């Protein structure tokens, strides 16, 4: 249900005084923002920023109208654990597990993950489609776990100014990382749970230029409200605010969300699907305070207990996604690679193009491999090491320019081996003259078979019923030496109409199929069958005309071709032989020869005078006849 909110609260009436409950200041974002803007008048007011943001939200909605899902955005995170020399796990120098539990909470809440405390069934509950990952590369390019422990030499931070100064000396590039700080508050900030810096809109047309905000950008939390006791019980936690929702709330501010009550009596948070509220709520009450609708106390942008919270709304999502698209430093983060492990020089052979399958008619072949750059640097030189059956390895020195994530096909010098089945291995070594940073993806291998014979290529373009096709090649004794197509049913002699699309080997509809065969020198019959009995030339409402062509690989000559037939079509051909094909019809003929006996002329060696194709002489003596 939508809750109309049309009031535009004057900036001068927004309440910036901390709201304290049971000794805790749930959020000091508005106070911190007021201090920042008073120190930097060039930032303008929140009201000015809101006018600009509302226009951008309208543009975002128009651009994504009708879209069910948006791309998942991933934000790299660094957590600065600020301490005073305490041992890890003591006081504010919280354990790794407590830090990591906070990232898990953020992902559960911002993705509304089923089966977690971040899930809800509210009709306006949104999966924000933003995820958070711990950085694995620091600003210098070195490996990191994303936890930056800093002995700052300060027991606690008693003023906002002290925290902001600390941030400027510890922050990592805010265009590459979301910076989070875990600290111990004291003095005038005692009881504060956290605060955030709102998104900046500097550099955009019609808006004032920001000053000094980039080096303090991020979110801050007291160490004992950081993380979840349910996920990592071994941490140090506040008795009430211990489920990680302080950071869920503060990151919401960092992404442009306002408090759900609009920081005013029945104020406006600029999200139409959040009901109004007179002020912040604590605990987990059930009440109606402003507009006749129940207060949405479950919303992460209220002040209720951690266990009460479980929802961002669709309008809040739209606001967040708009900020991620247009706000400086926010908009760069999804393109940051700081969650990808450093991998400067990493090459590998990803695919072996040849040899594969059957190498027909020759013991010599020319290897081709696909070289891939898996690393972050351009590859300008790499050794390709290759062999047959792990024996007699050879090295090819490749040079060129291969950019990250790109590939190139490399032709290697020809190799010779013996007939039979073999394994071809290929791998890379010393990319750019350096040690490969990931040896696990360097190489691959493939099995291939060297066969004596003659290669032929069959290309079939199927009509609308590819599953009806089956073919075979028979030698002179009617033995099938090659076949393909639908083997899930018995199609020969064709016309049986038993085939189906799910049959084993069935070809797809209206597609080109390429089959390679290797045949000994001799003469053969190519037979193609159709299960329906109407060939492959379309018809029956199908406008796609299929065809087939069998080609001799040695010279490109056509051995068989066709399209229009009924149940089957047979073509006799010879390959690697001096036989004469297509001799036409002939009868038995008596020949006059020296010596005794009667002789006849017949076709291709099976002593059946069927009038087909090949002419050869079979001499049969009287004795042989007997």
Image (cartoon, rainbow, N blue to C red):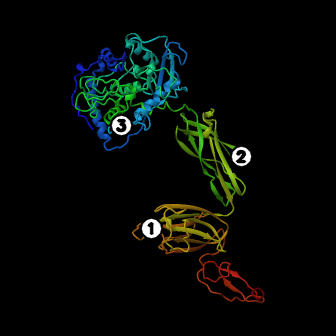
Mark 1: give few (<14), some (14-19) or many (20+) Cα within 10 Å: some
Q: Percent x, y for residue 52?
A: 27, 29
**In the image, is 497 to the left or to the right of 293?**
right
* Count of marks overlaid on the render: 3
Q: Position of residue 98 (x, y in %)?
A: 50, 24
Assign a secondary structure to mark 2: loop
Please state which of the two labelled residues, at mark 1 or mark 3, is closer to the viewer. 3
Point 65% across, 45% down: residue? 426
Please give left or right for residue 22 compared with residue 593 in the image. Answer: left
Res. 131 visible in picture: no
Residue 581, quarter of the rendered image: bottom right
Q: Is residue 156 above or below residue 618?
A: above
Residue bearing the label numbered 1 = 545
Q: Label 1 vs label 3: CA separation?
A: 51 Å
- Residue extending farthest to the front is 286
Please say if the residues under marks 2 and 1 sit with CB atoms less than 8 Å apart.
Answer: no
Which residue has dot 3 on it? Answer: 126
Q: Position of residue 327 (x, y in %)?
A: 35, 29
Q: Position of residue 69 (x, y in %)?
A: 37, 42
Towards the viewer: 239 or 180:
239
| The quarter of the displayed image where residue 184 is located | top left
Front residue of 182 and 412: 182
- The quarter of the image holding the C terminus is bottom right
Real-space Cα separation, disc 2 to disc 1, in angstroms: 48 Å
- Residue at image mark 2: 390
């Amino acid at each position: 249900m939508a809750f109309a909110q049309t009031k535009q609260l004057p900036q001068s009436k927004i309440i910036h005084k901390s709201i304290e409950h049971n000794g805790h200041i749930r959020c000091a974002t508005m106070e911190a923002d007021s201090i920042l803007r008073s120190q930097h008048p060039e930032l303008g007011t929140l009201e000015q920023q809101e006018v600009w943001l509302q226009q951008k939200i309208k543009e975002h909605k128009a651009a994504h109208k009708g879209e069910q899902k948006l791309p998942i955005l991933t934000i790299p995170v660094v957590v600065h654990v600020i301490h005073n020399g305490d041992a890890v796990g003591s006081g504010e120098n919280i354990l790794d597990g407590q830090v990591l539990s906070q990232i898990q909470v953020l992902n559960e809440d911002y993705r509304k993950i089923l089966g977690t405390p971040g899930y809800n069934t509210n009709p306006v509950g949104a999966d924000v489609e933003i995820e958070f990952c711990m950085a694995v590369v620091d600003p210098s390019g070195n490996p990191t776990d994303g936890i930056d422990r800093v002995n700052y030499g300060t027991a606690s931070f008693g003023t906002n100014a002290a925290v902001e100064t600390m941030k400027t000396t510890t922050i990592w590039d805010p265009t590459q990382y979301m910076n989070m700080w875990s600290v111990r508050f004291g003095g005038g900030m005692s009881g504060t749970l956290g605060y955030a810096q709102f998104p900046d809109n500097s550099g955009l047309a019609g808006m004032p230029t920001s000053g000094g905000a980039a080096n303090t950008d991020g979110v801050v939390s007291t160490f004992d409200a950081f993380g979840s006791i349910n996920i990592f019980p071994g941490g140090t936690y506040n008795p009430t605010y211990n489920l990680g929702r302080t950071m869920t709330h503060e990151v919401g501010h960092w992404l442009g969300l306002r408090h759900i009550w609009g920081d005013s009596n029945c104020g406006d948070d600029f999200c139409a699907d959040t009901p109004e509220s007179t002020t912040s709520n604590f605990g987990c009450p059930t009440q109606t305070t402003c507009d006749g609708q129940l207060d949405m106390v479950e919303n992460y942008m209220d002040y209720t207990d951690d266990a009460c919270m479980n929802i961002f709304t669709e309008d809040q999502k739209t606001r967040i996604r708009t900020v991620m698209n247009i706000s400086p430093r926010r908009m760069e983060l999804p393109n940051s690679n700081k969650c990808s492990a450093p991998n400067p020089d990493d090459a590998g052979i990803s695919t072996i193009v040849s040899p594969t399958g059957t190498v027909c008619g020759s013991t010599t072949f020319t290897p081709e491999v696909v070289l891939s750059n898996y690393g972050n640097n351009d590859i300008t030189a790499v050794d390709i090491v290759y062999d047959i059956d792990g024996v007699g390895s050879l090295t090819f020195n490749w040079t060129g320019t291969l950019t990250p994530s790109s590939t190139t096909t490399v032709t290697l010098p020809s190799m010779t081996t013996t007939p039979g089945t073999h394994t071809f291995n290929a791998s890379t070594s010393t990319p750019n003259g350096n040690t490969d940073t990931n040896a696990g993806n360097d190489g691959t291998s493939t099995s291939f078979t060297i066969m004596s014979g003659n290669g032929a290529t069959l290309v079939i373009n199927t009509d609308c019923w590819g599953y009806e096709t089956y073919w075979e090649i028979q030698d002179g004794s009617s033995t099938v030496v090659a076949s393909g197509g639908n083997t899930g049913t018995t199609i020969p002699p064709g016309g049986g109409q038993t085939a189906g699309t799910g049959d084993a080997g069935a070809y797809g509809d209206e597609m080109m199929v390429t089959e390679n065969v290797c045949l000994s020198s001799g003469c053969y019959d190519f037979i193609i069958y159709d299960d329906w009995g109407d060939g492959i030339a379309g018809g029956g409402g199908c406008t796609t005309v299929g065809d087939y062509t069998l080609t001799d690989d040695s010279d490109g000559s056509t051995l068989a071709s066709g399209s229009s037939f009924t149940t089957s079509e047979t073509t006799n051909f010879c390959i690697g032989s001096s036989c004469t094909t297509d001799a036409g019809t002939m009868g038995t003929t008596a020949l006059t020869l020296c010596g005794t006996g009667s002789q006849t002329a017949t076709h291709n060696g099976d002593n059946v005078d069927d009038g087909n194709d090949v002419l050869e002489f079979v001499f049969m003596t009287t004795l042989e006849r007997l």
